[in-house]
Image: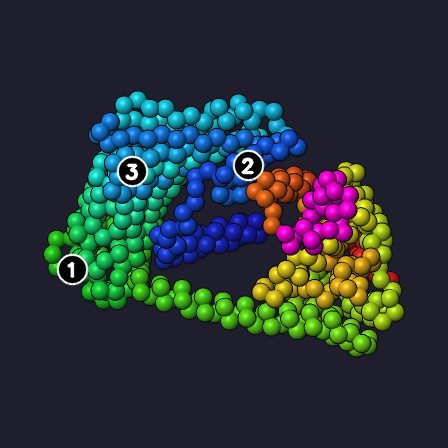
Amino acid sequence: MLLLLLCGCAIGAEDRARREYQIQPGSLFLFEESPTLSPCDPIPAPSGKGPVAYLDAAGNVFVLHRKDQLSLARTEVSGLTLHPAFSSVAISGGQRDAYSIDLCAAAGEIDRPDAQQVLDGIRLSRSGDTLTLTAPSYDPERPSRSELRIAAPRDLPLSVDGSFSAVEIMDMAAPVKVRTTHARIKIMRTSGSVDAEADEFGVIDFAGERGEVRLNSANEINLKLTATKFNGSLHALAGEPVRVILPDAFSTPFEAAVRKASDFICRAPLCSQIKHSRREGGEWFSFGSATAALRFVSTKGPVVIDSLEQLRAAREQQKRETDEEAAERNLQTRHINNVAGSIHSEADAREYVNLLWKHFAPDVPKWIARSTLDRVARAEYAAVAGGEFIPEDRIANSFNNFVQRIGAPDWAHVTPEELHAIRAGELASAKATWNSYPNIWLMPNIYHVGSAGNLAPGCRAVEALKMLYTLNHLFSNAIYARERLRQNPVASHTVEARQSSPSSQEQLREYRVAFARAQEKEQELRRVEFEYVKQHGSKAYEAIVREMIDGVLP
């Protein structure tokens, strides 16, 4: 019986979370344009130092990259039909005499020999008015990405029939027909007829003020009607939520249909004018006295109506509150940094540690005792007043004992030189960003520096614990530092100079490749830790973490 009750509670919580998601307003950001990006990054000249990885807009790292271009004069075609697979497609209409088509293809993991084969699998072919884009299906072991960007004559018809392909269409005046599966369709500012269908978990986002529009989604539909009157007709049918954002003065008659009355949610000023009736096996809600030109139907979820003005006001209010919270947080962070740089007594050190404790207390494990804080405060004062800094080799040895205890590979062991390189990079970042973006994790006054302000060997107590945290939770920083030291043995002493000078595109890409490798190692170390906890329990894991801390603090 107890098991049944627990299962019932879990199912109930899941249902409540699903319901809360369904009745949320449509998100305004869905209908905003991101800054225009080139579909392909510039390709740097080979350096002769090994493979250069290429990055897509999302920051994914690929070994190989290809850009194909095609131009079709409007005299060659009467319109355009696309058949994309496992790709993303973006089409923008304008006053043009030709189609300008760019295909950006990227493929292959670092250090994998089959990258070219994967890249060759991304191909764009033409037959008359039809373009077919083929690409490999998703495979984490053989990653790839294909993006098709088309600048189209807005007055020529467009048809897209894709699978596993996101499609974005903007500013078309001619008829548009689009279908895809397992992906999102986004349509904005069209003025002609639109017929869109998203199957198999697909989603449709539409923003506009005119046209003969038919939308059909197996999942959800988000609508933003941008004028007080919709010129034309719009029918939206979804298996799950239909979310509608309307101007407060919206006047075009509409009707909505749901399974049960509680599935109609209206939070706009016009809600008081909506009439409810039961017909055709469902609940119908109507606005306006004339024949409805707009119809919103959800077969298994809610129809949600919200005010555009109210959502904008709520977003502005949230932004103000976020800005105020950030300003207060910045003041607190600057105060803690000032205290860290003004320790003249053990009482000052205790104030510093107590301020940090207050900031991090909600996230600190309960087994961290008050006696540990006292040790940190005493060690801070001993470092500042008596020069008793914690050696970097002591921190490295303590961490190495930890990774050895959990059964990590040898590459998880760090050296004092790598530790120093991490510290140098962090101090450089702290100095570069502090005035504009104060960050509790990058306070410049926590570091042990010499009279000239340069990083010095040995750590103060708080920085030593921070280094343990970095090694434990951001081990990619250690691998990245190791790579820098391998390429340049004096990197740990020149990080600040390097960060202050601009980097070439090729250097930036090489840094990103190194960091991608580092993240792979970090994920591997996480799996080792998880297996240790799984086999030995969380108490045993806490015990060796305590040993690691005890091995660093005096």
* Residue at 61% across, 66% down: 435
Answer with mark 1 or mark 3, whichever residue precedes in sequence.
3
Residue placed most toward the observer, 100 or 90: 100
- Residue 152 image label: 3
Residue contact at pointers 1 and 2, CB within 8 angstroms: no
- Residue 44 image label: 2
**In the image, residue 65 above or below residue 417:** above
Q: Is residue 300 visible?
A: no
* Residue at 66% across, 61% down: 431
Marks 1, 2: nearer the viewer: 2
Residue placed most toward the observer, 20 or 5: 20
Report helix, strand or loop for mark 1: loop
Residue placed most toward the observer, 362 or 424: 424
Residue identified by numbered label 1: 288
Question: Left or right: where does residue 195 sit relative to residue 85?
Answer: left
Whole-number angstrom distance, CA of label 1 to CA of label 2: 60 Å
**In the image, residue 184 above or below residue 13:** above
Corner quadrant of residue 46: top right
Name, please, the residue furthest toward the left: 290
Q: Dot 3: within a 10 Å radius of its alpha carbon, few (fewer than 14), some, or many (20 or more) residues?
A: many
Q: Is residue 108 visible?
A: yes
State the image coordinates of residue 30 (x, y, percent, origin top left). Answer: 38, 51
